[in-house]
Image (cartoon, rainbow, N blue to C red):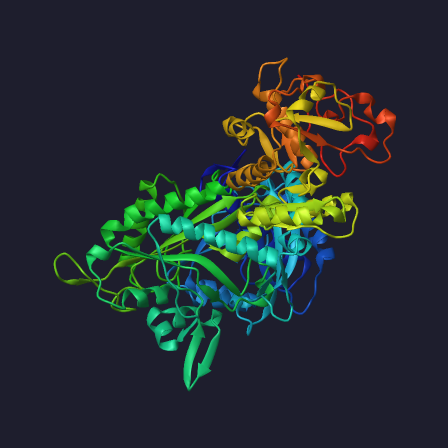
Amino acid sequence: MTIAFTDGTIRPWEDDEAKRIFWHSSAHLMAEALEALYPGVKFGVGPAVETGFYYDVDLGGRQISESDLKAIEDKMMELAKTKETFERKEVSKAEAMEYFKEKGDPYKCELIEALEDGTITFYTNGHFTDLCRGPHVKHVDDIKAIKLTAIAGAYWKGDQNRQQLTRIYGVTFPKKSMLDEYLQMLEEAKKRDHRKLGTELDLFHLDPEDPGQIFWHPKGWSIYVTLQNYMREKLVRDGYQEVNTPAIMPRSLWEKSGHWGHYQKNMFVTESEKRIFAVKPMNCPGALEIFKSRTRSYKDLPLRLAEFGHCCRNEPSGTLHGIMRVRGFVQDDAHILCTEEQIESEVAKFCRLLKDVYKDFGFDQNLLVKLSTMPADHVGDEATWQHAEAALAAACKASGMDYALQPGEGAFYGPKLEFTLIDALGRPWQCGTIQLDYQLPSAERLDAEYIGPDGAKHHPVMLHRAVLGSLERFIGILIEHYAGAFPVWLAPVQATIIPLTDAQNEAAKALESKLLDAGIRAETDERNEKMGAKIRAAQGRKVAADAVAGRLVAVELDVHLVAQERAAELHRVVDGRDVVIVLKKAGEFVKGLPLLGSDILQVGVRNPLEASGHKLVAIVLDELLDRSVGVVRTVDHDVAGDEAVLVLLLLGEHLGVVVAVAELELELVDVNAFLILDPEDAFVVEHEADAAAGSESAACGHWPLCGCCCQSPPPQDMRFRGGRNPRRRSP
């Protein structure tokens, strides 16, 4: 569907700018409702955000709670149905100031005071007038569905020394069905909340006495380190050099960089020996100090300096949110020092890296790019800014990526590209960024120089860039995106080994050791609990795969070499107590099978096999082959891959390796077909049924295959204890 706006444009709802205008208009509608319900209310700012809008308001000492939101919603709907329009009016700065002084709104007066002299625009809907650049929806009754979602406290301009205002969040839609879908998504989001799952999965905790700081537990830190090392490998291959700079640096450096004048309120400041220092809120000045540490040539450029530097920002406590917004964090940060001629190629190179990384997490679809331009609070002249914005826009286009304009949202030192990914619930998350900076390396700031081909000194251009953003926030996004069931390569525990009884503990620990030696993050559950409880616990922890260590994975296997003189005895139909498994060049056979492709097998029942999943299964297979347990060949049938896969899957079931058939159509294979082909390679595996099983236990005759290849399931007492039967798709 399309929406008409006051600037004469008609945009589809799916357009980001359309949503932004729609939600900003809704913020004005909410303000009108608040003014009607709470006379004398004063207004701060009411912007659109990625998932709706909010307005910061001063209710004059009155308190509202979430129970009051329904009345505000109803008033908004009442006003929307009047079909009132947004009226635009141009006034001078003096006229704007006079209006809000007379109205008694000090917050709007302060905003006007910071504006340059010239024309200011007002927008009026009904009885409410606001300071606004516009545009707005042409018809207010396009707002058909309203939901106010939360109330929070927010200091005016983020300054904890200023007045605390009431922030009311909301979202609106042009159709009620869209709101219904959104509310369903919110319910699912609650289940996936990273704070909830972080506790349940024992990943981290947050201490209210230390707001905005994360205490990483072993499993959470495993994810953190794995993610960091993943990025480190990517950066090395992409030509970056890793550095590390001090966490605390002197005030003089921050003054030169411009951060002291533009960012001081967000910095933690300390004093030593009568000198003022600040904990770094960002890494860029340190990177430039490394660049300046020796004479540089144009031949050294581009110089790509990466840093996983720990930064601290004094964020207001009311804005903190789990591990998504914190005071202490690490960015996958890097600073590229280059010439103007290298800007386009370096930005394009970064865009390729970013898309490659996002693809590994399944975020390569619907990637959104925004170009943020010069903000009101900036350093440098306008001409330089225009040049920088044009250069970044051209580089973005050259990389094959379109962008939407975000006026006035650049960093104080330069314009930037922002990259927004979409998670499994359709929610946008701004993560990656690349910022073009002529200011920090300039003579007026940190005075970084290199010797050009002409023998003269020049100032490089600096590109600030991050792919993930902060590692903390990105992990929070991943927790919610995957609902805690991480891909195998990232999972803190890739395999849990569960002994059936204490008798298998030694064997289980031996298998754990083998997996650990192979780089698989494994653990053994030796608790004195029932099998079902252990498996449920592994599932609750979102373990990628769990293996049950029963008699068939014990070190002392009931596997016996069959002497040639006994070979004839094996040409018989086996019952449910003796399973004959024939081996014939098992290793070669396994190598030749397309067995580990993601279209054939799954580890657990959740994650398709990827690189680490392949490795995990390969280790388990190696364990079997080392113990002379392998695949079955038949004499009555052609040696078909499907039949062999079937038997191998059954073997895996008995070992407790949790596997499932994805897209294979398997034919029924009678147990009578399992015959010895080569006595020298033949072994018998004796498997005891449950003690409760009597003579009728073997009535099926296919006991090892029941639940997979038989048309009917086995008696309950005959099912493999603690295992999951692979689902068979009937031909």
From where the camera sits, is residue 491 visible?
A: no
Above or below, 624 relative to 262: above
Residue 662 sits in quarter: top right
x and y, in percent, of residue 428 in the image: 53, 46
Above or below, 625 relative to 368: above
Foreground of the two, 309 or 680: 680
Q: Is residue 275 left or right of residue 556?
A: left
Q: Residue at x 78, y 50 (%)?
A: 529
Outermost residue, left direction? 454
Outermost residue, front direction? 565
Q: Residue at x 53, y 57 (%)?
A: 472
Foreground of the two, 258 or 695: 695
x and y, in percent, of residue 542 in the image: 65, 46
In what quadrant of the picture does the N terminus appear? top right
Residue 566 sits in quarter: top right
In what quadrant of the picture does the C terminus appear? top right
From where the camera sits, is residue 641 visible?
A: yes
Q: Is residue 246 left or right of residue 670?
A: left
Foreground of the two, 397 or 685: 685
Outermost residue, top direction? 636
Above or below, 125 relative to 276: above
Foreground of the two, 450 or 82: 450
- Number of numbered discs: 0
x and y, in percent, of residue 236 in the image: 37, 51
x and y, in percent, of residue 685 in the image: 70, 31
